[in-house]
Amino acid sequence: MTNISYHISNLLEKMTSTDKDFRFMATNDLMMELQKDSIKLDEDSEKKVVKMLLKLLEDKNGEVQNLAVKWKEENQNALSQYLQASAEPQHCILSNICKHCSTMTANVCKKITAQLTGAIGKQEDVSVQLEALDILSDILSRLGGTLYSFHSSILNCLLPQLTSPRLAVRKRAIIALGHLVLTCNGNIFAELMEHLLAELKRNNSTSTTRTYIQCIAGISRQAGHRIGDYLEKMIPLIVQYCNVEDDELREYCFQAFESFVRRCPKEIGPHLPSVTGLCLKYITYDPNYNYDNEEDDEEEMMETENGEEEEQESDDEYSDDDDISWKVRRSAAKCLEAIVSTRHDLLQDFYKTLSPALISRFKEREENVKADIFCAYISLLKQTLPIQSWLHASDEASKEDIPLTMLQNQVPHIIKALHKQLKEKSVKSRQGCFTLLTELANVLPGCLADHIPALVPGIVFSLTDKSSSSNMKIDTLSFLHVVLCNHSRDVFHPHVKALLPPVVTCIGDPFYKITSEALLVTQQLVKVIRPLDVHCTFDAKPYVRDLFSATLKRLKAADIDQEVKERAISCMGQIVCNLGDYLSSDLQPTLKIFLERLKNEITRLTTVKALTLIASSSLKIDLRPILAEGFPILASFLRKNQRALKLSTLTALDILIKNYSDSLKPAMIECVLMELPDLISENDMHVSQVAITFLTTLAKVYPSSLSKISGTVLSELFQLVYSPLMQGGALNAIVDFFQALVVTKTVNMSYGELMKQLTNPIYSSSGVSASLHKQAYHSVAKCVAALSSVCPKEAPGVVNQFVQDVKNPRSSAAVKMLAFLSLAEIGRTTNLSAQKELKAVILDAFASPSEEVKSAASYALGNISVGSLKEYLPFMLKEIGGQPKRQYLLLHSLKEVISSSPADSLKPYVEDIWALLFKHCECSEEGTRNVVAECLGKLTVVNPAQLLPRLKKQLTSGSPYARSTVVTAIKFTISDQPQPIDPLLKGCIGDFLKTLQDPDLNVRRVALAMFNSAAHNKPSLIRDQLSTVLPHLYNETKIRRELIREVEMGPFKHTVDDGLDVRKAAFECMYTLLESCLDRLDIYEYLNHVEDGLKDHYDIRMLTFIMLARLSTLCPNAVLQRLEQLVEPLRATCSTKVKAGSVKQEFEKQDELKRSAMRAVAALLTIPDVDKSPVMAEFSSQIRANPEMSSLFESIQKDSTSLSTTELMDMS
């Protein structure tokens, strides 16, 4: 026996060796020894072995750790006994075990749970009780779901502890109950809640009542989604206890309210007025202090420094150690913050009631309470911040602006309450003031203009006060930067003398973050004291020396933080740009430093931007000393693999060529030209666009230089013109370049030469034209028209050539297509009425066998009509009336006329066009009706006051076709830009939205499409209609059995759902509303319909999965409350198997559906506290256990990671 003990002790010693191989071999040997039946360990040796096993679970080497886990699985009985008998802190041991979660871990925990509940229930030794409660909490938090059979006994054991004489025991019991409610079933949760409610009503003693309210708050924080059903009974009781004279009890009541507001926003809604009223009452609750006296004496106190000290002393006299009323005020402030941050819809009410109350409490004497009052007000400001997006940019001044106006009126009161506190000794108070003021300046730019004189002394004090912390200075500088950016420069001019010295001192601060922030402020100050864009009488000269010297010192330093280096470069760039004429002999050495920084890989991008700024200065700074050396360096950046550097360099070169053309030598330009062909490629359209813009500048300033690279650059440009991706800014840049190029009359770049090269691939019979995308023809046509517009003498010949090409029966479809598109582009700006045969040629083309040629001819007729309305529009209207077979193409031509013609020139023809269109609005062909609708919509925009009422009148038409045409027409009157029709449309859009109740299915579908367009492009039109529209919208998301029919296809029966398109349109509207009108939605009602959509048809499920992922980000709390209902359809989708004999498309469809569902799951898992949901935990385990689901989930996560990385890279 002694030999065995010695052998095991030897192995245990080797297991602590620094050599991982020793540890591994010793562990393996010990495992082998212990498996022998002949070996029986004494109690002491067994403890040592188990202790070593637990230690090895934390081993740094993976192989040793895996061996320990394997060993742990085999020795769970010994481990359980050790845990029960161990004198060590067991929660430390347990947390070690739980990290290696497995079946064995669950078994160990199950074995010791009964002992733990027994130890808690005995109440003999408090220290044992506390330890047992800690361990139980730990187990429940990690493995609560696996202990479901013990939940009832755990609850019965914990409830009596809530009345324990020891507060520490109660506190730990509350924590354990919080972990229990996450995983327990409904019956146990109901039992717990009924018990708490009964005890609250009984109210045996204030002490236990406090504990029960704490317990309710704890449960709400952990599992708020489950407590909502009980709030109706709870809140009146807690409101009642707020009036009991017990400050601690009140504090816990407000903590409970705060938790309810955050976790059960819908259920607390009806009780919000009473809760808010209590918060406002108790935020001023300070029985031991008289603020009125302080206000009376304030003026005298502020006269001298001594006065301040006396005031401070009097605070201390009032402050009683037993006074905990500040806790009540703090919890009330936190509760108000929760209300403000969760109820954006009550913003106007908050500015009437909450805002004045909070402002009046800025005088709070307790620092901690004041910090929370500031937080509550900052939260209110954040809710008021106007949404900066294209969605709201076009909105009229509406209800959205009312809170801003109310805030504007309260700004003087805010400043009055804060400006004296900016000079207080308390750093925390000052920081709070500056944070609040920064937020205020962001929400209402310019609102502090009248109050700058009151704020400057406080700013200077915080920057110069020796007691100010680093964070204090950073916050002050940050505020100053925001104010300088969004206020008029004039308001600062009287204060530059006071502000500049402390800011300059901060540039020299040893802490890099202060220096960095100070340089940012200095850069803005330079723009203030010497703006270049407006005339300014302020004399900046006295301040230049200080600004320059401080910045130069930082610019020269090489051993400083990267952020400081970059900001010093930017700041000096601004100084040279705005004050360069004051620098005299200092200018050239400074530019030399820029040249050095340009050579450094880390600082080159910032330096390029700084040089761009200097080069664009109206002061015409002399850059000649650095151009010779700098140009080749800039040229070399164009071949670097850093997109941001390429773009910035091209912008810099463009400015230098424009402003310093007389200082540049041909050799400098040549080194840049060499790099340009590689930049022109469809792989990066934006870089191509900027490169072409630079070439255009070059063609205008240095036309001779282009002959050297004409071949390579032009070949790349023509490749780009034929690209299917060519459109927008890049196409406009190419058009501008060709126009600039042809004017230079450079050899090999004449009009004829360029036209030949542009059109050759289409005219050649080599088959190249067959591979060209349709967009390429449009791009070539635009270039042809642009060249013709700058060479008017050549234009008639080209037009004749195109007409002949179209007439020639041997011309290919590609040639005819190009001819018509080119005639269209030329005809839009040039009157082609002299071409007498053009009308006949176009009408003949309408009979062409090629659809592309017909479409191009239709486009040509419309655009040529724009250039000569008198000649062509009456002809077109006559043809539409007399040619039923060509009607569709002629209507497309009319659409082009209405879209592209100026409103004034169209007005004489409006009545004729209107009458003609209404003859065709009941056409049975949907394609024709859509074109008519587009024409009607665009025509209405020409004269909305007269035509919109006529459209509205047509809503009563008996024909569903006419009604659907009218509703679709309204869709085409809505654009994302402000228009004169908007106020008229807003007044009557409600009538058009009533078609959502139309008996005809198709009318309802187009009404949904119109509603979606309004919600996407101009939400202000429909925001006020949502209360009446949403019920009808939600109604369209329901599956209607009467619209589902069976169609026999030979021996098979196929189910057709006629309501699918309408449902799809309704869900698309719901998705759009998430982005534009979220604050007007009842998110719980909305989620009901999302839940239905998750079980609908394939197309709708795909859409609702995307909606669910979006909701996880926008409304995480609401989604968390509905998780149980939302997870089941996701689980069903992810677990579906396709039948073995199904076609390939069915497999692909199901795979895409699973991927989409898994993306929604990944989004759900990002919600805070989602790990506390047993349903989600179970589904996560199922995903990990299933190889197919697990690999799919991993690939989704990789995709999202790589996507976010790409976005971050582009942001650079």
Image (spheres, rainbow, N blue to C red):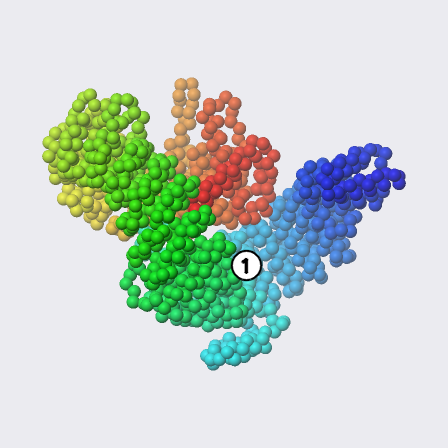
Identify the residue shown where x is 48% and y is 42%.
1205
Side of 132 where 443 appears, left or right: left
Identify the residue shown where x is 40% and y is 31%.
1057
Identify the residue shown where x is 79% and y is 48%.
85
Q: Considering only vertical position in the picture, is 651 above or below 424?
A: above
Side of 1015 where 508 appears, left or right: right
In the rendered image, residue 793, in percent from the top left (x then y), is placed at 14, 37
Q: Which residue is mark 1?
A: 257
Amino acid type, label 1: Phe
* Residue 1027 appears in the rendering: no
In the rendered image, residue 670, in percent from the top left (x then y), is placed at 32, 41
* Residue 570 appears in the rendering: yes
Nearest to the observer: residue 509 or residue 1049: 509
In the rendered image, residue 312, in percent from the top left (x then y), is placed at 55, 76
Q: How many marks?
A: 1
Nearest to the observer: residue 792 or residue 53: 792
Q: Considering only vertical position in the picture, is 172 above or below 880?
A: below
In the rendered image, residue 201, in percent from the top left (x then y), is placed at 61, 60
Query: In the orientation shown, which residue stands out farthest toward the top?
Result: 1051
Side of 465 where 808 appears, left or right: left
Side of 101 where 482 appears, left or right: left
